[in-house]
Amino acid sequence: MYIPTGAGFATVSDSLKPYLKDLESFQIVAQKKGYATNVRPGRYIIRKGMNNNELVNALRSGNQPVSVVFNNQERLENLAGRIAEQIEADSFSLLKAFQDEEFLKKASFDRESALGMYVPNKYELYWNTSAEEFRDRMQKEYNRFWNQERLQKAEKIGLKPSEVIALASIVQKETAKVEERPRVAGVYMNRINRGMKLDADPTVIYSIKRQQQDFDTVIKRVLYKDLEIDSPYNTYKYAGVPPGPIFMPDISSIDAVLNYEKHDFIYFVADVENFGYHKFAKTHAQHIRNKQQYVNWVNKNGIRR
């Protein structure tokens, strides 16, 4: 049973009425135990066979937590919608809390990097948690996630936590194979360390979606003209890590960047002989050969966009 914030005893009585044999006797017990004037919002477990005394006791002190789960959200708007499905706060109030400029400044984030503060996981919260309380809890979880070990690893590879998250989002968009992510991360770290642009197709796709303000569109192929889109997220046009994540990466992807595989590869392309995986190359000539295989497969299968 869910009791909204601000609800009174009349609302509780109306909600329970279909399940009670004698509503009046419940109301009398509630009055005697002081519950009628002390209704608390939240999620409560009401079991069949409870007597009035047990029922009132459950409503007085039995607020039950809910498991809130989220992952792989592309924007703060998506995250707000996902959380609103699981707690009382609506998506509008959640998004407002997420984008609060004063909070972001104090927390050392901005609107571009803010999505990175929300570490995907399962969290126990009370259903009546407010938007601000949820946001503040997530900040604490973020700080807990970035423990001394992870902070030291980030410093060692020359990236800030926010940059690690942004790079992890690219790595995860490049490969769904968890075991391949450290190798892909290694390619990007090699490019960063050599002063090369990342040249990551997922950042171009994200740039197109931002430009068109259509995040539901499906783009299967990046065209040469797309590489010229003027967006800070377009890593073909601008060097370095983008100003924020292109979506919410898993913890495994963040750790893949922090523990990236050491190798000499600086190129990779989809492996058409082993779908889901990639072919890696140390030289541009080798990469061109691998890429041609992929282009031939794309053309053969009529993938235009």
Image: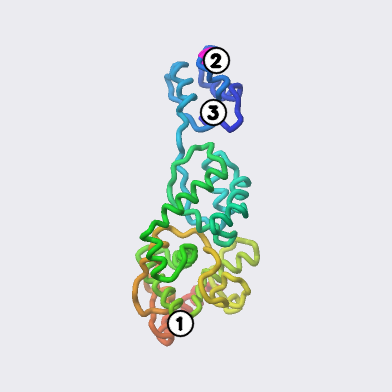
Is 195 above or below relative to 255? Answer: below
Q: Amino acid at mark 3?
A: Arg
Where residue 277 sits in the image (x, y, percent)? 39, 70
Report the amino acid beneath label 2: Gln
Spatial CA distance of label 3 from label 2 is 15 Å
Where does residue 278 sit, x and y in percent of width and height?
A: 40, 73
| Distance CA(mark 2)–CA(mark 1) | 78 Å
Q: Is residue 21 visible?
A: no
- Left or right, 238 with respect to 120, comes to right
Return the disc, 3 or 2, that comes first in the chain's sequence: 2
Question: Which numbered mark, 3 or 1, is in the foreground of this view?
Answer: 3
Q: Nearer the viewer, residue 23 or 157?
A: 157
State the image quarter where residue 64 is shown. top left
Q: Is residue 111 above or below residue 62?
A: below
Dominant secondary structure of the residues highlighted in magenta in the image: helix
Q: Which residue is mark 1?
A: 292
Report helix, strand or loop for mark 2: helix
- Residue range of the region highlighted in magenta in the rendering: 26-32
Disc number at residue 40?
A: 3
- Residue 31's disc is 2
**Quick one: which residue is furthest to the bottom in this view?**
285
Q: Quadrant of the C terminus?
A: bottom right
